[in-house]
Image: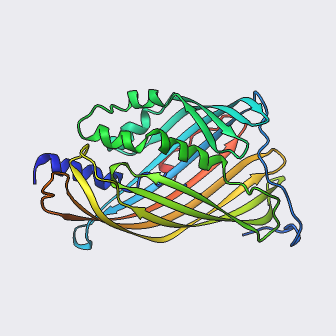
Amino acid sequence: MSRASLTTRRVASQLCLVGLVLLGLCGNQAARGQQVTLAWKLRPGEVFYYLMDTTVTTTVGPAEAENTTKARLVMLYRYHVLETKPDGYALEQTVEDVLTDDKTFLGATYNQFKGLKLKITFDRSFRITKIEGHEQLLKRIGADDPVVGKFVAELVNENAIRQQIQSEFNFLPDKPVAPGDNWQRQITFAVGPLGTLTLQQTLTYEGTVAVASKRLDRISVSAKCAYAPPKPSDDFPLRVTKGELQTDYVKGTILFDREEGRLASAEWQAKYRLKLTVASAKPDGGKEFSMEMTQIQQNRTEVSEERPNLPNLDSR
């Protein structure tokens, strides 16, 4: 196998599930049938911070030749509410800081996000209608690299960024809910030139839970995942001809501060198994080879008015 093919295969292994860039009830739960309204309350000039802490363990290859890597990524976002209007909101997102122990090109890519500013326009349902500033990210990540650059540019294209940010805001029900009520959300992640992952979420309202001196609304999250191979393209030396995704579990918990009108915290865990068949992108196709990957993800998000301290990367 050529050096370029080996490099591309290694890149594909690392990227395959990266985009799956997603989420004990205490006493005094709201009585069954008592409905509540969960809604964001954004105020012009308001500033708040999102601290996202993700650990990913990836195992590549058959059992007799497995290679396992573990990487942690911490990203701190600052949101500034620029405008609230009857038809929506405008926010500025700034990547305040990035910490990672990922030694691959992906770690270097994450570090290029630091200082990036985006202007995001939402409608009243927190669906994104416009993103401004994304082109600055593409300039930073070295998208002109003949192999790696194209992969990374696909992973952080505008639609991928849109899906990630929208999932952080568009998770609340569209109408009042009582404990036990559920609703659906769908998130689609592009995994570069390796295809697309679709996450079909079921969110269930579970009532209130006591946290410190506050009562927060608790939402449980479960999800089913589906994989679709990419469309044929001449832009990459390899192409995925078929794939199979198995989901062991995707589950999480959201705590929402109804009084403040914003997310308080969220955590989720997921385990996926992906099998791909890959061939050369040349017309003759060449010899096919198989890739097998298992990935375990753990994520925690905390939201605060004050800029939080970043954790020690060795603390998890």
Residue beneath the point at 37% across and 48% down: 192
2, 256: nearer the viewer: 2
The answer to whether residue 275 is seen in the rendering is no
Question: Can residue 161 be seen from the camera position used here?
Answer: yes
Q: Residue at x 64, y 45 (%)?
A: 127
Residue 117, position as x, y percentages in the image: 55, 28
Query: Where in the figure is residue 56, as x and y percent of width and height?
Result: 44, 56
Question: Would you place residue 111 above or below residue 61 in this image?
Answer: above
Report the side of 29 relative to 162 (left or right).
right
How are the residues colored? Answer: rainbow
Residue most toward the left?
1
Identity of the residue drawn at 79% across and 49% down:
39
Query: How many numbered discs sit on the rendered protein?
Result: 0
Q: Is residue 36 left or right of residue 123?
A: right
Please state the horizontal and vertical placement of residue 231, each as a whole percent of the image: 33, 54
Q: Which one is in front, 230 or 64?
A: 230
Q: Quadrant of the N terminus?
A: bottom left
Expressed as whole percent of the image width and height from the top left, the position of residue 277 reads: 25, 64
- In this rendering, would 306 be left or right of 143? right
**Up-down relation of residue 253 to residue 304 (above or below):** below
